[in-house]
Image: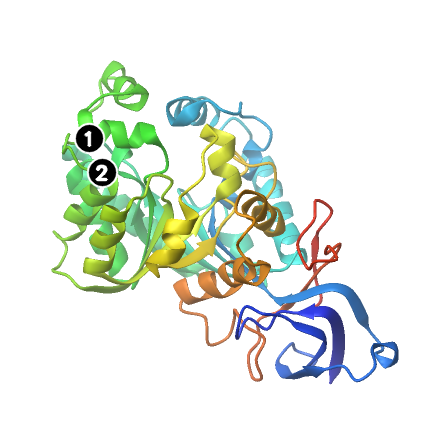
Amino acid sequence: MRRIAASYLYTLVSPEPLRNAWVEYTDDGVIAGVGLCDDISREGAFIDGAVVPGFVNAHCHVELSYMWKLFRRGTGMAGFIDQINELRDTKPLEEKIADIRFRMDRMWESGVSAMADISNCSDSFAIKASSPMYTRTFLEVFGTERKDCPAIISDVLKLKEEAESFGLDAAPTPHACYTMSPELVTASSAEGLKSGFLSYHSEETPEEEEMLVSGSGPMYENRVRAGMSTPPVTGKSSLLYFIERLLQVHPAPFKEHILLVHEVCMDQEGIDAVKEVMENPFIALCPRSNIYIHDALPPVDLMRRSGIRLAVGTDSLSSNDDLDMVSELFCLQENFPHIPVGELFTWACLGGAAFLGKEGILGTVEAGKRPGLVAVDHIGPDGRLTTASRSYRIV
């Protein structure tokens, strides 16, 4: 049996931390119990900081790690997509694999116990299969032309078989309204929902909304110039459009776990529509990616009031400086200073675990669970994160 104590122990059974508290765990990381310290000077291992459960990175594209430091900031989504098209596959496979392995190892060392990862190819499969981190792989599909839908679905189902041959939990998922024909949104959603899980880039940028609402804006013009089909102009938000396509799969309610990634433009109408048809919706916040691409943030307070469960992701190294969960939380804390730190940790640990259906193992420090334990240092005197705060894995 091992024991460690800390100034702040966030069990996340409730958001409030235990002050000067200890946690005991077995050699293989199973939590045995928690309690308050009688005398911290007698604790053999005491962390002057916080201890939290292992993080869950709820949205990542680890296969894009080779794109680190290649992208210009602040281009908007249209400019970002142009860069993706220009820079994708510009490094040899050996370098890509090395970058994926380095970032996976770094995430594990910094305390990420599980990840919802987007894949467009098989580059990351072997590395994820050998990692101690749990991953669920969302096999993302694209295709704006209706005639291509059957072939795209056939190809992604072959990729699913390959992922499963590595022992990975994997299934198709749609990318976003602006990269897919209506038929492909529905067909890929149908395949993904069979697994019980779906991840969808939604309302990431005002440019996306312009496409659907009025058939205008930089993203719409890019597609027209490229001779590509554009999504239907509905006069409604892209989130409402997605829900309409989802309802072509089966009638509401949707009991499956559906992750809406970004939601920078979410409003009350969208929230009401989500809650009307989805029983298990989640929102993945990726604040530093949103700032990197178009200097905007989601309406976090509106989301909090909605009761929809929140999680935190890092997105990819094409739109972020690193894959550090504490930096994402610090960004949220700086922009929404009224939100308690314990609530931020809850999103980053329990929110993602619940989306992945792993809350029986991960997400909280409770007897019998094996969430991993993570130290977060350089906590301020008020218990808040600081610019120096970093995380490292204890177990």
Identify the residue under disc 2.
237
Residue 160 in the image: above or below residue 221: below
Q: Position of residue 29 (x, y in %)?
A: 65, 76
Q: Position of residue 367 (x, y in %)?
A: 58, 84
**First reached walking from the N terminus: tag 1 or tag 2:** 1
For numbered disc 1, what is the local secondary structure?
helix
Image quarter in which the N terminus is found: bottom right
For numbered disc 2, what is the local secondary structure?
loop
Dividing the picture into quarters, in which one does residue 47 lie? bottom right
User: What crowding class fits label 2: few (fewer than 14 Cα within 10 Å), some (14-19), or many (20 or more)?
Assistant: many
- Do we see residue 230 in this rendering? no
- Do we see residue 154 in this rendering? yes
Image quarter in which the C terminus is found: bottom right
Residue, far right: 41
Name the residue at 19% across, 49% down.
243
What's the distance in space between the residues labelled 1 and 2, CA to CA? 6 Å
User: What crowding class fits label 1: few (fewer than 14 Cα within 10 Å), some (14-19), or many (20 or more)?
Assistant: some
Identify the residue under disc 1.
213
Say whether marks 1 and 2 touch (CB < 8 Å).
yes
